[in-house]
Amino acid sequence: MKSKSKSKGRKMRLAMPGAVVVFLLLCTVSSIAQITQLPLAEVEKRNAAAAFATTREASLFLLVGECSHLMVNSNVNMNTIARGWFDRNKPEMEATYTWLDRYFSHLKVTNPEGFKQASTALARATGNGVLQASRLFFSRKPPDITHCEKAAITYSTPQLDLKISATNPGFEQFAEFPATLARVRTEPNFAVPPNLKFGMEKAAQSIASVGSVASLDAAEAAKERGDGAGRAAIFKGLAERGDGHAATQVGLMYLNGEQVQRDAVHAYRWFYAAWSLSDMDGLNAMGVMNRDGIELPVNLPLAGAAFYLTTAAARNRETFDRASNNLDKLGSRIDSDTRSQIACMRLSVLDDALRAPIRELVPVVQGKSISNSGRRLGEIVKELSGTYKTATCN
């Protein structure tokens, strides 16, 4: 076991430096203001140590997200390993996030542009580090129990913890990081802000952002080698775990015949699955199929309802823009009476109409129940509120 830990330590050396260097260089180039009387060199050292620590933690969140469901019957418990790592590395992570909280709060007030650059740099550094770690753990293949158990060794071995990792072969270049974080903790004004969360308390939020990185990278690798079936299988697996975006990707593959046999009906089933998992791109895609009559009768009210609701519930600018453009393409084909009809539509009625073409087919994934299903779109979509107030809804 000891020799395996050292071998994994040498590999991890390749996963971390790029992330740290990117963050350090970007912070240097941006000429970020010093905090109080700290020399710029000390600020850079703290940022580099923070990038290393957050990347190491985020890579653990990756393993929890990718491996927990695979290791249910394993002798190795991923959640137990994660809790153990958090307990052992709590002082270093408290120093990391207390420093970052103080640092970013200072920049936000004194140098807003520097704040944007630094926060973006840290996010990019952490993301790159997690991607590199996932490739070392899984070699761009779908995670399996064997590789999950091997990856867990790097977090179950105390010799690879943050405070002493530099004593291991391959980690020497990180020797200053534990000392840097220790300096943060020994400052007279050091105090952990009560708003900060650590360990498994923040796991859910973090896993949502990095917990599928390895699977998505494996899907991209499958696409690069022309393995459409393998790529679709990875996305389907993610969708079965509740990932609506992955379900949308399966739908797009079938709709466009992208490395799989084109099947518009199957595409619609996956778009509906995405909608049932709260992914608005799936709803938008069903709107396109209803608007353009793709394997369906043209249904402009249903298409308009899908586009309107997507614009109101979109979680990112790209989704909002796609739905807005689709609404623009409808143009005069949606008259005032149709808009009134859409405004009066309840969420339950919308869902029932969307499901109608595939009602007799077994759902491809288990979706979520719609909350507040009795609400009308006119109550949700700002652009329909005026129409809704003046409309008479049955």
Image: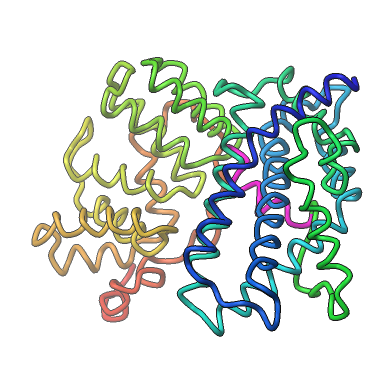
Query: Given the current orientation, which residue lies at the most extreme left position?
Result: 332
Question: Which residue appears at 87% of the width and 34% of the height?
Answer: 156
Instruction: Please give the count of numbered marks on the rendered protein.
Output: 0
Query: In which quarter of the view is residue 38 placed?
Result: bottom right
Range drawn in magenta: 201-212
Q: Quadrant of residue 293?
A: top left
User: Does any portion of residue 209 appear in the rendered image?
Assistant: no
Q: Image point 49% across, 44% down: which residue?
A: 276
In the image, taking residue 152 as reference, residue 248 lies left or right, namely left
Q: Position of residue 129 (x, y in %)?
A: 60, 42
| Residue nearer the viewer, 11 or 174 | 174
Quarter of the image holding residue 40?
bottom right
Q: Position of residue 22 (x, y in %)?
A: 53, 50
**Res. 28 in view:** yes
Which colour assignment does the render follow?
rainbow
Front residue (pair 355, 231):
231
